[in-house]
Image (spheres, rainbow, N blue to C red):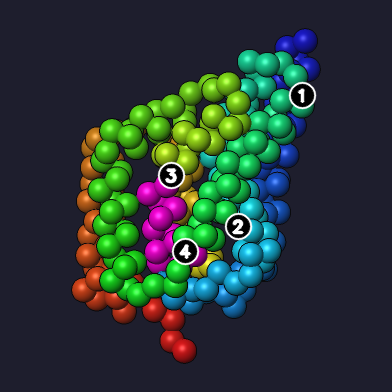
């Protein structure tokens, strides 16, 4: 029984990482030529949602792999893993709908202010609580997605601010999201990190041309 459960967990984790890898390839292909920095246009609704789902699978599934593993161990059924991952991605798909409704191409000053706000958010009690809960065994992928949204929303705002269709910024933000899911909170790291984000936001406001990919030459 234990060996079967171990095999099931390993297979599900492999599939999760495999789906994320495939999503990276497809997302990069679909995003080609779309990056205009802060002035990026999202395109049509269908195009954006398709790309957004690929982006979320690529960025969020690697960090969710431990949660998928824990969920399978607790429930003991093979199908619970894919269902957990799918419902987790459903939360981020809903976020994408909100992004499409609210997003507008913007200038560098707006990008800088959003980045500063994201840095400040990193130090809030809400962020800390969501990050803590995002590392625990939860009842469903929806619940996990809700708390991970609260944990990662600041970083995702930075992506939207500086270049939502930038593969480079997507990779940077994805790495930070995964790190925060896998590593426990530590003030000695989190406070300087938040300060660095605020400093980045200030740099974007005062010297936008010094930030790679923020202003794309026409």
* Res. 103 mark: 4
Q: Can residue 196 be seen in this view?
A: no
* Image quadrant where one finds the N terminus: top right
What secondary structure is the magenta-colored segment mainly?
helix
For disc 3, the marked residue is 152
Disc 2 secondary structure class: helix
Q: Nearer the viewer, mark 1 or mark 2?
A: 2
Magenta region includes residue 33: no
Magenta region includes residue 155: yes
For disc 2, the marked residue is 52
Q: In which quarter of the image is residue 43?
A: bottom right
Q: Which of marks 2 and 4 is in front?
A: 4
Which residue is at 73% across, 39% downward? Answer: 15
Part of the protein shown in magenta: 153-164
Disc 1 secondary structure class: loop
For disc 1, the marked residue is 78
Cα distance in 3D space between marks 3 and 4: 18 Å
């Amino acid at each position: 029984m234990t060996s079967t459960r171990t095999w099931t967990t390993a297979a599900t984790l492999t599939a999760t990482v495999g789906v994320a890898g495939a999503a990276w390839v497809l997302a990069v292909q679909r995003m080609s030529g779309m990056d205009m920095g802060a002035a990026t246009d999202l395109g049509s609704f269908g195009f954006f949602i398709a790309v957004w789902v690929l982006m979320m699978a690529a960025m969020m599934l690697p960090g969710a792999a431990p949660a998928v593993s824990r969920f399978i161990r607790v429930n003991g059924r093979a199908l619970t893993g894919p269902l957990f991952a799918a419902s987790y991605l459903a939360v981020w798909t809903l976020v994408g709908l909100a992004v499409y409704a609210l997003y507008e191409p913007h200038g560098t000053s707006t990008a800088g202010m959003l980045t500063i706000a994201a840095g400040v958010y990193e130090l809030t009690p809400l962020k800390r609580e969501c990050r803590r809960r995002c590392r625990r065994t939860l009842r469903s992928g929806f619940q996990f997605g809700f708390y991970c949204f609260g944990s990662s929303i600041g970083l995702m705002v930075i992506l939207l601010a500086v270049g939502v269709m930038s593969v480079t910024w997507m990779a940077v933000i994805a790495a930070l999201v995964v790190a925060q899911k896998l590593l426990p909170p530590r003030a000695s790291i989190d406070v300087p990190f938040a300060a660095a984000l605020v400093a980045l936001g200030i740099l974007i406001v005062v010297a936008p041309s010094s930030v790679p990919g923020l202003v794309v030459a026409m």
